[in-house]
Amino acid sequence: MQTKLKAWLNLVIYLVMVAINTLGAFGYINGLSQKQVSDRYDTLITPSPFAFSIWAVLYTLMLITLVYWLVKHRNGQTARVVDEISPLFWLSSVMNIAWVVAFSYELIGLSTLFILALAASLALISQRLKAHGGMAVRLGGLTFGLYGGWILIATFVNVAAFLVKQGWDGFGIAPATWAIIVLAAAVLITLLIQGRLRNAALTLPIAWAYFAIWHRHTAQGTYQGQYPLVGTVAVIGAVAALAVAVLVFVKNQRCVLPLANEQKG
């Protein structure tokens, strides 16, 4: 398939994905929005609603990246990126759409499988971007690093929602304790993934999500300070995620992705 056609397909698939997400957000799929479904299976690690405004940032960056890839598809570096990343982007988009539909129909277990596949495909995109260079990679690294980081934390929340739906009793352990364990585990797992991807943008959405979780546990939030330790751990996690982002950025010589790999392009 020609590079130009792949670049156009990226845009078309992106528009379809955004359209399906918009329909889901407004409750046109099964009569329930993602927020309404999330509220039905609320967890102590679900962020405050404002956190989900990050989708506007993610989709705007994605559009800018895909348009750039299309406009510059004749450039050698950009063409290599488009040729290698496009199939993974198509896969990630299909998983995104499948997640929206499954979640809207309250098929939480199935949606968990889809979001796991989405997270894996985004990790592969970040990994493969490291083998290329140029502005196409700079944009892609930022876009898919942020996207991948947000989906990582969303995966943990999705799993928690699935357990709530199943009526899991947590082996008798208090929900607040489980929330703390999950928040700590999410940071540790992200660090392990970060060690391989070395994408400075990856942990920024984690910090944003943890800030929103902390906000929900403040006196003004949903839980009105009932679980202060959960809020404290969320703050610590947010600070740690920000610190990691800065550390990786500096280690990458002030780049989102490793500069040494970029020079290969």
Image (tube, helix red, strand yellow):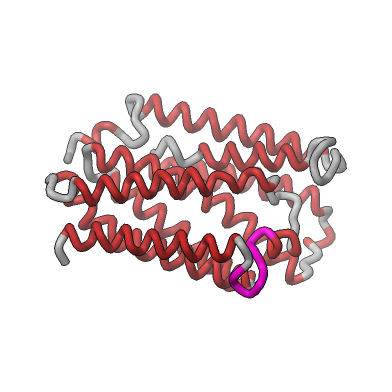
Is 237 situated left or right of 194 in this image?
right
Residue at position x 52%, y 53% in the image: 151
Is 80 situated left or right of 142 in this image?
left
- Closer to the camera in the image, 112 or 103: 103
Q: Is residue 122 above or below residue 245?
A: below
Q: Quadrant of residue 214?
A: top right
Residue at position x 16%, y 44% in the image: 77
Residue at position x 68%, y 33% in the image: 235
Q: Quadrant of residue 263?
A: top left
Residue at position x 57%, y 57% in the image: 155
Q: Is residue 145 magenta?
A: no
> Where is the N terminus found, in terms of image quarters?
bottom left
Q: Is residue 2 above or below residue 213?
A: below
- Closer to the camera in the image, 259 or 23: 23
Name the magenta segment's main secondary structure: loop
Count of marks placed on residues: 0
- The image position of residue 225, as x and y in percent, is 85, 38
- The image position of residue 146, as x and y in percent, is 46, 43
- What segment carries the magenta color? 28-35
- The image position of residue 16, as x and y in percent, is 41, 65
> Where is the C terminus found, in terms of image quarters?
top left
- The image position of residue 156, as x and y in percent, is 61, 55
